[in-house]
Image (tube, rainbow, N blue to C red):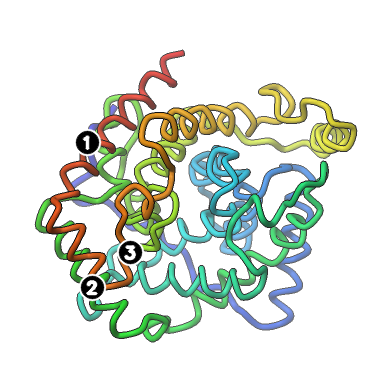
Amino acid sequence: MPTGPDPTPPRLVIPLLRADKTSAKRLRRRSLANLARMGHCAPTVMQTLLDASQVEAPWLVKTTAGLPGGIGNAGDECGGVTAPLMLLGLRHARDPLDRGLPMVVYKGQDLLQRFTACHGTSLCREIRGQGRLPLRCVGVVRQSPETYCQTAAHSSRHVLTDTCRHAFARLHAHFVEHGFHCAHAVLTALGPVVRVDQPLLDATSGFVGGTVFSGRTCSALAAGVMALGAARGEIENSRVRVARMIGLMAVGGDAFRDDRNAFNKTMNLGHALSQWFRTTFGSTQCRALTECDFSTPEGVDRYIASAQVTRCKDMANRVASQVQGLLAT
């Protein structure tokens, strides 16, 4: 298997989708239909956007297989955020820097702001609540492709304050200087066991600094979960099996057992990775791990002055090693 990206790889073209009301209605209907046969958020959102884009890329759906339930069923960033962020990466990873920042950072921050404004939070645990059936998730999955389209169609250059933009740009420059990208460090280390090509690196380009520098789930952990999907992911395509899974959820049964849904095994592997990460490092959240707020100059100064990029590199290597172990089981 290849150990790194092709030096002259083709770009996977993701067309710009219409964001008008008629197109939004079509997306909502398609989302519900896909959810009924797939059963999980991130893969459904990804498949819906690929369908609407007329792009055949099952590897992208498989890469999202571990993301449901908030990145490995840990309750963190909703699959309605992570799947669209991957497509934004594919569209913008190779764009020129804009005022010192990759365009995917502007786009990802725009997506987060729109998603949070619509749903009040971007966290899976807060969206799904305590009920046995995650009824609110249905509306989120239905809405998420439309939110992506709005973000993709927007310039997004003014979503950050000048202070925040300068802080992000300084951190980005620091990462470039040290040849580090949270997600890519994990993926390139996994080259012997996971097919790592340029489209995968493009798709994961927004997973840096805890999701576009927002200090959320450690992007090395997120990359590890996506690597599990890229290597082992399968795609569910059965309304009957999804209906049975929902029935089990309703009565408190083991709906997420590996054999209940084709996505479950990868999601459960991702959950095991998340639990190991939390036990090993004390938190899954970038801001808690670094004790730095990347949206402020003071936070970035603290990160740089304490040479934390060295620790982040070590964490990425340890995540890659753990993923290798999980794939070997």
Label ID, residue 54: none
Q: Nearer the viewer, residue 209 or 37?
A: 209
| Quarter of the figure with residue 239 | top right
Vertical comparison of 301 with 10: above or below: below
Q: Nearer the viewer, residue 5 or 181?
A: 181
Q: Nearer the viewer, mark 1 or mark 3?
A: 3
Q: Residue at x 33, y 55 (%)?
A: 208
In the displayed structure image, the side of residue 135 where residue 167 appears, left or right? left
Which amino acid does the dot numbered 3 rest on?
Asp
Q: Quadrant of the N terminus?
A: top left
Q: Residue at x 52, y 74 (%)?
A: 113
Q: Position of residue 71 (x, y in %)?
A: 53, 44
Q: Position of residue 124 (x, y in %)?
A: 63, 52
Q: Position of residue 275 (x, y in %)?
A: 49, 31
Q: Which residue is mark 2?
A: 297
Label ID, residue 293: 3
The secondary element bearing badge 3 is classed as loop
Question: Which badge, 2 or 1, is on the more N-terminal residue?
Answer: 2
Q: Nearer the viewer, mark 2 or mark 1?
A: 2
Q: Nearer the viewer, residue 293 or 254?
A: 293
Q: Residue at x 74, y 51 (%)?
A: 129
Instruction: Say few, some or many: other residues with alpha carbon within 10 Å of mark 2 (under 14 / 14 to 19 / 20 or more).
Output: some
Q: Nearer the viewer, residue 60 or 281?
A: 281
